[in-house]
Amino acid sequence: MILLFVVGGGVFAAWKMYNAMPAQKQSQIPTTPVRKGDVIVRSYARGELRAVRSATLTAPNLFGTVQVTKLAALGAFAKDKDLVVEFDDAEVLSRIEDKQLELDQTDEQLRKQQAELAIRNNQDQVELLQARYSVRRAELEVKRNELLAIIDAKKNELSLEESRRRLQKLESDIKSRMQQAEAELAVLRERKNKGLMEMVRERARLTQVKLLAPMSGLVAIKQNRGGFMGTFGMAVPDIREGDQVQPGIPVADILDLSELEVVARVGELDRANLREGQDVLLSLDAVPDKKFNGKIKSMSGTASANLFSADPAKKFDVVFSIDMPQLLSALGAKPDQIQRIMATAEANRKKPPLATMPSMFAMGGMPGGGAAMMMGGGGMPGGMPGGMPGGGGGGPQMMVMQGPGGAGGGMPGG
């Protein structure tokens, strides 16, 4: 009984103390309502905006000095087959003239050798006919030996043997001279073929001095790293007219801005929550107050590490598409301009795939170089704020991606 009395007194005292507490202090006790719903996974990464289709124009091997004489302006719009870069062709033209002169000389020697061979063949045929006539006459003289003295008969036999030996030697000499003449002609023909091959090679180099745009797009000039002699930390200048470049180095990019995409690197945990075809929302740094629709185009199956980045962890590459009409409309393009741009994208899409797809940052950044992506809407009632409309259980997740801001530039036709 005493124990029950003590416990009851303690409970009564605690209740009195709670009632005596101020209302403000009572409200500080954290509480939360319990509700049932899906868990939304959020991931953060940095993305980069780039062109879906692009082409790199490289300096040709002109077998000599490769000097830029004409160069399209940075940011200029080049149509299909427009001249973008032209190199000095003086050395190539000089070599073509020299090769043509050598070919003419070889042709002259070949014609002269053939004429001499024809004359020599005629002379050999005359000598061969005379030798055969001498053999025939000696044979007729031998048939008269029965009517002649022994000494005269012996002379006729010796004369016949001498005529036959002379005919045999003449035939052998003619054959040897013919083989020698054919060998000399073969040497001249081989020299001519070699000259023709070199001429074809030089003419092919001449066609490479002009680099034409393989498709319609924006011109992005590369940096002249081969001829840069500055110190560490200095900015590498862009290639300009008059610069000498090394064969094979990129000179300019043609960027098809009619269709863009975003590429990002995500970790292993985020990769498990993504799938191709997932709807996304993108936010560009250049247009931070608007969001754009997109989808996951592709994801790499293996992770790789970027040795030049601050993060050495291995990550997966993910490529996102973007709704181009929506993006162009947000950037101020008119409906007719959007229609022309999409027609250009469709025409370029039907062309064979190009060799290279460099980043849009090759020209110093594109409008809205960074992108923020929000994928899916989750299963929360009413959806996530600013996200996709709410869905049922097991809906897609959400990812937010932030990238570096882009620099100037413009959309084609905008």
Image (cartoon, helix red, strand yellow):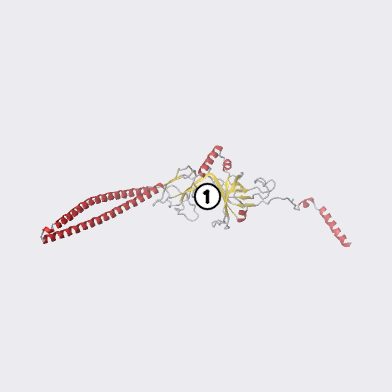
Direction top: furthest residue: 336
Q: Is residue 40 left or right of residue 364?
A: right
Count the labels in the image: 1
* Label 1 element class: loop
In the foreground, 167 or 346: 167
Horizontal relation, residue 83 to residue 181: left or right: right
Camera-side residue of 6 and 167: 167
> x%, y% of residue 102?
31, 50
Q: Is residue 147 left or right of residue 319?
A: left
| Crowd band around label 1 with a 10 angstrom C-alpha radius: few (<14), some (14–19), many (20+) | some
Q: Quadrant of the N terminus?
A: bottom right
State the image quarter where residue 144 is shown. bottom left
Residue receiving disc 1: 359
Query: Residue 258 at x, y = what percent?
Result: 53, 43
The quadrant of the picture occupied by the C terminus is: top right
Residue lying furthest left in this view? 149
Q: Nearer the viewer, residue 385 or 17?
A: 385
